[in-house]
Amino acid sequence: MDVSASLVKELREKSGAGMMDCKKALAECNGDIDSAMDYLREKGIAKAEKKGSRIAAEGLANIYVNKNKAVILEVNSETDFVSKNEEFTTMIDTIGNAILNSNVTTLEDALTVSLNDGTINDLIVAKTAKIGEKLSLRRIEVVEKKDDEVFGSYLHMGGKIAVLTLLKGANEEVAKDVAMQSAAMKPSYVFISDVPEDVLNREKEVLKEQSMNEGKPADIAEKMVEGRIKKFYKEICLAEQAFIKDNDISVNTYVTNNGGEIIKMVRYEVGEGMEKRCENFAEEVMNQVKGN
């Protein structure tokens, strides 16, 4: 039978299953929503809906580059075990390359990118049902460069940390060195000018209190703050950090010495800022065996 788009949409929202699975279920059940829902449950496809509220803070980040365009993304799973699964890594590659070959720039639009069978969102829902864990595309960033610019990319621990850098005037080796620096030293910003005023003011207040607690007069404390703020910048700003391959120079000096200029840095660390699972793994496995 001919299934309407509105029926497919209603079943997708109810089941969490992919578009093509919903369409097939409705066709098999003559357009009856409840019967189609039972059909999906019998096939194990509707299981993805039950996992929507579970925590997925493991997973992998990766980078995809084609000529003057690059995509960095993070895809989450519930356990590290699943993140090493070939089906999971293949899914990430499918998602990354699809975004790279599209015109989207936001996460919301990325989920609607068409694949051979449905969308990226449909693929994630289908794999959630098949693998048995909540999977999600957490974030993406699309970066484009000019012909006189270069990308640098680096994956640490197989994709637990991914860094994409963009430099002007230097070569890819220098850009990769900067990406490795970012992976190792975890800068929050690229330049001093990128540090938000509220972050800077809060740090100054903390440093001033520290100085005064050391017994320093207010005027001396103020001067000490200025010196300590420079150290603060060297910790959180990529350009100001001591270069890991030569601590006598800053990262910015290293890049400049190689005829370059830092333009951009994107650093993804899997699960950063997310609540982590703390379940007992053995107990979880037993629950799955029992069918919970």
Image (cartoon, helix red, strand yellow):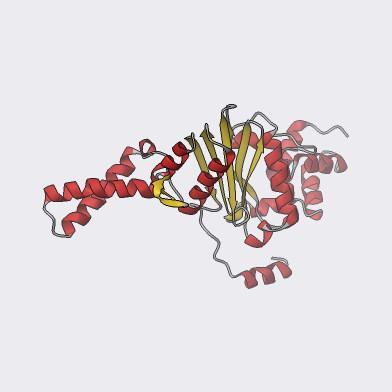
What residue appears at the point 80 percent right and 37 percent down from the top-left corner? 116
What residue appears at the point 45 percent right and 36 percent down from the top-left corner? 256
The answer to whether residue 24 is visible is yes
Frontmost residue, 192 versus 242:
242
Residue 184 drawn at (x, y percent): 49, 53
Residue, far top: 147
What residue appears at the point 58 percent right and 27 percent down from the top-left corner? 146
Picture quarter containing residue 63?
A: top right
The answer to whether residue 140 is visible is no
Residue 258 drawn at (x, y percent): 49, 38
For the image shown, how many numbered marks are present on the structure?
Answer: 0
Residue 27 drawn at (x, y percent): 86, 39
Picture quarter containing residue 143?
A: top right
Frontmost residue, 5 versus 87:
87
Q: Quadrant of the C terminus?
A: bottom right
37 vs 5: above or below? below
What residue appears at the point 44 percent right and 51 percent down from the top-left corner? 246
Frontmost residue, 259 versus 31:
259
